[in-house]
Image (cartoon, rainbow, N blue to C red):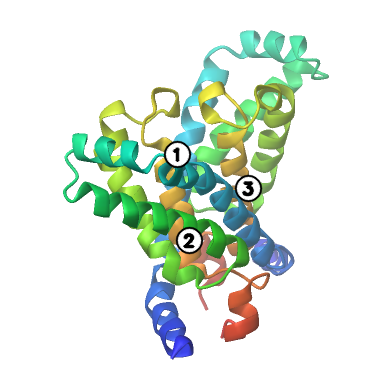
Amino acid sequence: MRLKDFYLELSILFNYFQSFSLLFARLALAYGFYEPALTKWNNFDTTTEWFSSLGIPFASLATLLTASIEIMGVVLLVLGLFTRLITVPLMIVMFIASITVHLSNGFSVANNGFEIPLYYFLFLSLLASHGAGKFSLDFLIFGKEK
Amino acid sequence: MLQTINDLSKNILQNFQSLSLLLARFAVAYGFYEPAMMKWKDIDGIASWFGTMGIPFPTLNAYMAASTEVLGVVLLTLGLFTRLISVPLMVVMVVAIMTVHLAHGFSAGDNGFEIPLYYMLFLLIFASHGAGKFSVDYFLFEQK
């Protein structure tokens, strides 16, 4: 079947870009988490008040946790180190952010809806399941993906 | 120890590859739905808008962009010819970034290139990884 041969050949060619696509996604996510992470660290008390006004229990502990997860996320995603381990808490952060802040604003990013946290969640789930690719410390330390 | 943790998390999380690709495909298809419909409903308006932005052959390009996006919605949802359709969709995103969004900076709140950039990254992942097992592609091409 000629179409099948064509598509399989195309797949082999495009497979070479797997690690690139994962690297770019990691860098974009790290960049996206950079600002909210720093904002939380620099305005720790304001963030705590904001968290408790949202009804999040143990607000200062939650702020500390969120800020540390985000800042670690930035560093580890850039390096591609412990990628699978850091993506899971980051997904939880995105999930909570969607529910507490963005969900009531609807989908669209123009109204501060849950569009961007949803995209981050999806990128993180892709990274969690596929790993960081070959351009990563994970690959250097833990070796070949099967 | 670290090796064990890494292997363990890998073994568990690897099972979600196809699910994550499926959900990402749906999200991108949903994202293309509105701009695609908008272009089809007012193709003449889009053509003159393209003309004012200095895009050559605005009518032809309006039809090309609109059909690429509509095809993208359908094919990404089905997971059919996923790697193939991702490439023209990425081209559409590059053109959109250069002609419309770049001047507004990065942030999505100012209509910057944030969202089209994320779409490009999703599409690059689809092109290089395929659509996963929950797709027509898998039944047609990859199943042994």
The picture quadrant where one finds residue A49 is top left
Task: Give the camera-side residue of B22 and B94.
Answer: B94
Check disc 3 and give the amino acid type.
Ser
Sequence order check, earlier mark of 2 and 1: 2
Residue B135 visible within the image = no
Q: Quadrant of the N terminus of chain A?
A: bottom right
Q: CA distance from mark 3 to mark 1?
A: 21 Å
The image shows residue A137, relative to residue A107, as above or below, that is below
Task: Give the camera-side residue of A145 and B139.
Answer: A145
Query: Mark 2 highlights which residue?
Result: A72
Q: CA distance from mark 2 to mark 1?
A: 20 Å
Q: Residue at x 61, y 84 (%)?
A: A141
The picture quadrant where one finds residue B15 is bottom left
| Disc 2 element | helix
Q: CA distance from mark 2 to mark 3?
A: 32 Å
- Between label 2 and label 3, give the one nearer the viewer: 2
Q: Is residue B129 left or right of residue A105?
A: right
Check disc 2 and give the amino acid type.
Met
| Disc 3 element | helix
Task: Give x and y (percent) for residue B61.
Answer: 73, 23
| Disc 1 element | helix
The circle drawn on residue A116 is 1
Q: Few, some or many C-alpha atoms within 10 Å of disc 3 (few <14, some 14-19, many ≥20)?
A: many
For mark 2, name the chain. A
Check disc 1 and give the amino acid type.
Ile
Q: Residue at x 41, y 57 (%)?
A: A68
Query: Mark 3 highlights which residue?
Result: B86
For mark 1, name the chain. A
Task: Give the camera-side residue of A9 and A101.
Answer: A101
